[in-house]
Image (spheres, rainbow, N blue to C red):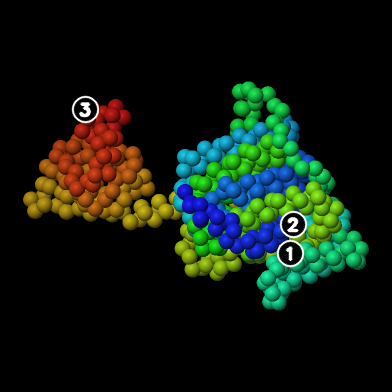
Amino acid sequence: MISISEYRQQWFGNVRGDLLAGLVVALALIPEAIAFSIIAGVDPKVGLYASFSIAVLISFTGGRPGMISAATAATAVLMVTLVKDYGLEYLLAATVLAGLLQIGIGLLKLGRFMRYVSKSVMTGFVNALAILIFMAQLPELNLGNPGVTWLTYALVAVGLAIIYLFPRITKAVPSPLVTIIVLTLIVVATGWDVRTVGDMGALPDTLPVFLIPQIPLNLETLMIIFPYSAAVAVVGLLESLMTQNIVDDLTDTKSNRNQECIGQGIANSLTGFIGGMAGCAMIGQSIINVKSGGRGRLSAFTAGTVLLILVVGLGDLVARIPMPALVAIMIMVSIGTFSWSSIKDLRLHPRSSSVVMIATVATVVYTHNLAIGVLVGVLLSGIFFAAKIAQLFRVSSTLSADGRERTYVIEGQLFYGSTEDFANAFDFSEVLDRVIVDVSRAHIWDISSVQALDMAILKLRREGADVEVVGMNTASETLVDKLAIHDKPGAADKMMGH
């Protein structure tokens, strides 16, 4: 738990930077929220209300100040079938349930499992998101689409020039905000025909109201929405915690993973009651926020509040913002998000790390599903790690002077990846009176290794040798005492399958 003074500092320690950054983020949220609504098959106001609600609520309840959460593509794509088959009310109910599941995950402190996501997976996740962010801008650059002309390319180029050159003049005002203002004034003054925010869909003109999803409250409904809610809860937390790590690195600060899980859950649950869809942390908007000077909770609160004011109170003005301005900002985000050093590191890093990174990128880009990409990366990391540990395993043996006693010395980690080498190290045809298995330099980890030890002991005994295991550490001994059968009646028959 953080202290009251620390919590107050997270709100008011960077007021000017948070307000300006929040304003930039609010403008960038509008087209994305509309686009994500379209992906999910619902009215644009569902995504806009969700972005407002989640951003504001997470500013109070989240565990990572300066991180932006709102409606996202990662959660929207999971809801498509539910909306198509059952309608909006079921989506709202699934959003509430997803939030409750996330709260439960946070209370169980399962956020700690993020430590098992390797740096290679993180890098692949970041690079894949950068590619997806850039790919999402391509429809706005396709000359075959209505409203996209050579002027679009010219305005995007001007926007990028402002973004990268204006900070050389002053950093007092975020360059993305300057880009939006300048390009909007140019388009309005010249009357050029380019796509605007208004072309993305109708903006809401009323404030959201509290409502309870109109669905039957029975087991059948639960069975319908639970699979979607579980998927949204897991994917949402996965993206949020990965983004949280990135913002931690960008700001050189630490945050609370479990509190973030609870905060995301509260935000999603309450959002479902005002007509909004589920969301999670957004790496693109979070990087915009940090690079624009946002560091505290006030930035997320400002982004959500200004977003609602803009779309409800100033919808006519917001609708006139040219899409090239927002495309330029998102291209800047994709360039800044991509880890360019990772390309150079492909030759320097171990081949296994490079394979994990590339596999994560390829899977996310191919499936557009962050969870699948990260799962593939984590599994590959585990396989490569197990292979490396297995290589450090070694068995040596010495025979006594009279040739009647042999001592096997086990060194390293005995687990499922090294049991084959362990079994192959024994000569079961050798006639001995006594065999000592010295495990003082080893650690026994799992049921596979216990079973391998059982098999070796029973085979040696079958050949007439007296077998003694020595040097076992406390943890290994506890596991062996619980699972081993070599000293139990009928052990040989059980082990040999009789």
Q: Amino acid at mark 2?
A: Leu
Q: Is residue 477 left or right of residue 391?
A: left
Q: Which residue is mark 1?
A: 177
Q: Within 10 Å of the Cα at label 1, are there few (<14), some (14-19), or many (20+) other Cα atoms?
A: many
What residue sits right under mark 2 in the picture?
27
Which amino acid type is marked by label 1?
Answer: Leu
- Asked where in the image residue 325 lies, by quadrant, the reply is bottom right
Secondary-structure class at tag 3: loop
- Image quadrant holding the C terminus, namely top left
For the residues marked 3 and 2, what is the alpha-carbon distance in whole angstroms? 74 Å
Decide if residue 273 is on the left or right side of residue 483. right
Percent x, y for residue 171?
A: 67, 72
User: Residue 177: in sight, yes or no?
Assistant: yes
* Most foreground residue, 375 or 80: 80
Q: Type of residue at label 3?
A: Pro
Q: Count the marks.
A: 3
